[in-house]
Image: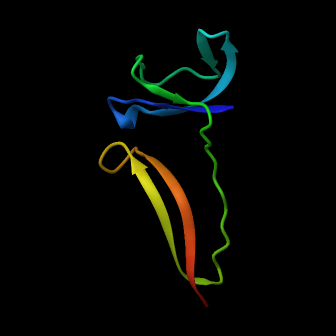
Amino acid sequence: DYVYIQDVGTAADSEWHQVDIIVGNTSIDLTEGLVVAKDTSDNIFSDAENFAMKLDLSGVARWRVIYKAEGGTGANVAIWVRFIEVTDFE
């Protein structure tokens, strides 16, 4: 499983990681180490998903992506895609 570790102080320091093992109620071991140190105010989301999806939009003339951005002002934020709306076909 993957977890999303949200850095509450600096959104750009949030990270995705694969879980290696859960040790009782005390800790989570990751397959790779953290890039940035975390503290107790940060959040870990266990139901997070990280995936890429190919979309064939070859017959679509117009479409839009509805999303929610969380964190900083621009780069290095978590993007939550809500849906893709197709409004016109070729």
Front-most of residues 33 and 26 = 26
Snapshot colouring: rainbow
Extreme residue toward the bottom, this view: 90
Estimate the x, y position of residue 25 in percent, counting from the top left. Answer: 62, 10
- Image quadrant where one finds the C terminus: bottom right
Q: Measured along the vertical axis of the image, is residue 44 above or below residue 23?
A: below
Q: Measured along the vertical axis of the image, is residue 2 above or below residue 61?
A: above
Estimate the x, y position of residue 41 in percent, counting from the top left. Answer: 39, 21
Extreme residue toward the left, this view: 73
Quarter location, residue 60: bottom right
**Residue plotted at (56% across, 63% down):** 83
Side (left or right) of 32 relative to 36: right
**Residue plotted at (46% across, 25% down):** 35
Estimate the x, y position of residue 1 in percent, counting from the top left. Answer: 69, 31
Q: Measured along the vertical axis of the image, is residue 51 above or below residue 5?
A: below
Front-most of residues 76 and 41 = 41
Quarter location, residue 78: top left
Side (left or right) of 43 relative to 22: left
Q: Measured along the vertical axis of the image, is residue 46 above or below residue 51?
A: above
**Residue plotted at (53% across, 59% down):** 82
Estimate the x, y position of residue 33 in percent, counting from the top left. Answer: 55, 20
Quarter location, residue 84: bottom right
